[in-house]
Amino acid sequence: MILPWLILIPFIGGLLCWQGERFGPVLPRWIALITMGLLFGLGLWLWVSGDFTLAPAPGGEPRWAHEFVIDWIPRLGITIHLAMDGLSVLMVVLTGLLGVLSVLCSWNEIQNRVGFFHLNLMWILGGVVGVFLAVDLFLFFFFWEMMLVPMYFLIALWGHSGSDGRTRITAATKFFIFTQASGLIMLVSILALVFVHFNQTGVLTFNYADLLRTELAPGTEYLLMLGFFVAFAVKFPVVPVHSWLPDAHAQAPTAGSVDLAGILLKTAAYGLLRFALPLFPNASAEFAPIAQWLGVFAIIYGALLSFAQTDIKRLVAYSSVSHMGFVLIAIYSGSQIALQGAVVQMVAHGLSAAALFILCGQLYERVHTRDLRQMGGIWTRMSWLPAISLFFAAAALGLPGTGNFVGEFLILLGSFPSAPWVVVLAATGLVLGSVYALAMIHRAHFGPVQQEAPLPGLKARELTMVLGLGALLILLGVYPQPVLDTSAASMHGVQQWMESALNQLASGR
């Protein structure tokens, strides 16, 4: 029952927060913190105690470290089937950690409807955990769509009013329409796959293990793969379906930005690794060059647009588009080294992007603007925050000794044999990354002083959050082995699916 509890704990905690609001604003915060601490603790315990040499691979039944199955709608072949391997345990632990941080960073920021705010926050995280554990495709789609509604409320009710006519309602609606429309395309693909399997076997099922054995005609497989890819590309986000992300980030409260950058973008990469590649290996192999060039375009485009931003949160948001481009290149490389680099990059980006958004929130609380043109000279007026911002900006651009460097290095190293030009052009993103990261620090913290008055420094709670994230990022940079060991079997399975499909494609030519 441990896997259902990972999903139920945030849902129950969210309801308790909502009801606890009648006793004042402090109780919901503590309930939310305890709930997320429990989720994080359970995730760590499963990581330490699990055997992650078991993972799905081509041929035979998928094997899992932990599994839970119970009938839900037997007539339609729908089950509550949850399973965990090395990839999903890392994502669950990351969700728990960033859940704790999102509660802490909104401790003073959110002052109205505190209980309802934490209900939405907990339910987003519960839905995300469900996405990482569900291996029944109907259940996966259920959680995929379910996490959109509370995120909509989070941005629409507690977001910031934007500049240039952008409002939080517009940003929330744009986010919802983009992700909802692409999710419906994925639902059509799921149903088509189920009906093709039904025609072949006479069995109606949404079970992952059964659908892996479905034989698809090349044209059908390509169309169904595109249905999945579109849904994941929007959430990734892949250029040109990325335009919801900067608006959502800029208008979202700090906790919303932390969850959006740290976790929600990772659900898309997870979906590609868990579903799109194993279910449609031949179509994915055929599509791989297009996907990799989309990744290169995202890296360069995201970096150039980051440099052009005047809103500090939009700058960090576009940098996320750039960094996730590396993950897209790795997923379609067919290389074990690159795939494991993608997992490290997902974890490292989750930590560094969350830290940058927390720092943006702390800066906004003190200077009451996100406009870089109205900042300047903060280094001399405030202790701790500018120096910590410099560290995370350097980490985001791939400073050796941080997790981002390990992830990007493994991705470029593993992808080079199959796509040298892709890697050469992607590497320019590292140079552009240093330009926009250092430009952000220079505009915000150096230059002419806008106001002489000193600013209040970071409180113990705020300092603990960012220093803890910094320590984890350095630990991942100097000792990534636990993450690599945990993800090795899962990524080996994905690599086998991709490699056999790539070899088949090469022999066909």
Image: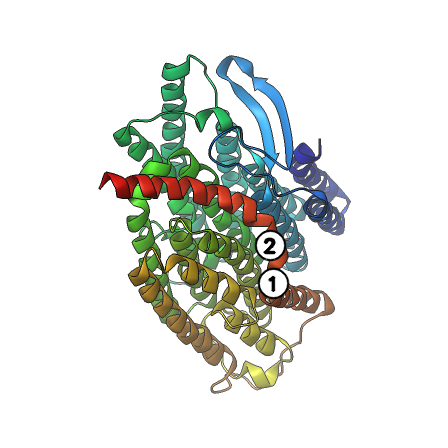
Residue 154 seen: yes
Residue type, numbered disc 2 = Val
The residue tagged 2 is: 483
Of residue 247 and residue 401, the one placed in the foreground of this image is: 401
In which image quadrant can residue 308 be found?
bottom left
- Quadrant occupied by the N terminus: top right
Question: Is the residue under label 1 in contact with that under label 2 (CB below 8 Å)?
Answer: yes
x and y, in percent, of residue 504 in the image = 31, 39
- Residue sitting at x 24%, y 38%: 508
Colour scheme in use: rainbow
Secondary structure at badge 2 equals helix
Residue type, numbered disc 1 = Leu
The residue tagged 1 is: 476
Secondary structure at badge 1 equals helix
Of residue 14 and residue 142, the one placed in the foreground of this image is: 142
In the shown orientation, is residue 436 left or right of residue 112? Answer: left
x and y, in percent, of residue 439 in the image = 43, 77
- Quadrant occupied by the C terminus: top left
x and y, in percent, of residue 367 in the image = 56, 73
CA neighbours of label 2 inside 10 A, class few (<14), some (14 to 19), many (20+)? some
